[in-house]
Image (cartoon, rainbow, N blue to C red):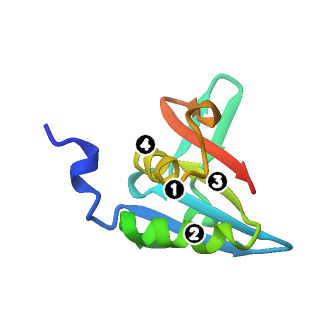
Amino acid sequence: MTHFLDTMGDKDIVVRVHDSYRWVVAICDKELVGRQLVEGIRSLDLSGNFFKGIEMDEEEVLDEIERCENEDATFNIVGKRSIQIALKAGIISSEGIMTIDGVPFALVLM
């Protein structure tokens, strides 16, 4: 069985930066884009354009997080690999990680 960190050289994370009154950064594991996660009354819709962006590998995502972090951005992070990268970048802590339908996610306001 391949551990998910063994595939981090792949472009398996999707990143999109929305330019609003502040940057809103969507970071999502590629295979989750297009899904709707539902658990009880909670739902997280990944099917719209919000999470459709540029496919990146771990290093590219880390660089983009650093670039956006310096611009007073907010981050919407969904998926195991995306969460691991955000932890590595230091923009989230394990206490800020929630799950829905078995998928970890975090919201960050810098």
- Seen at 57% across and 69% down, the residue is 66
- Seen at 52% across and 30% down, the residue is 101
Q: Kindly report the distance in space between the C-alpha atoms of the residues bearing marks 3 and 1.
A: 14 Å
Which amino acid type is marked by label 3? Answer: Asn
Question: Vertically, is 5 above or below 1?
Answer: below
User: Which residue is disc 4 drawn over?
Assistant: 80
9 relative to 95 in the view: left or right: left
Label 3 vs 2, first from the N-terminus: 2
Residue 16 or residue 59, whichever sits in front: 59
Dot 1 and dot 4 residues touching (CB under 8 Å)? no
Quarter placement of the C terminus = bottom right
Question: Vertically, is 11 above or below 108?
Answer: below
Dot 1 and dot 2 residues touching (CB under 8 Å)? yes
Q: Rate crowding at label 3 as few (under 14), some (14 to 19) or many (20 or more) other CA atoms within 10 Å.
A: many
88 relative to 40 in the view: left or right: left
| Badge 1 element | helix
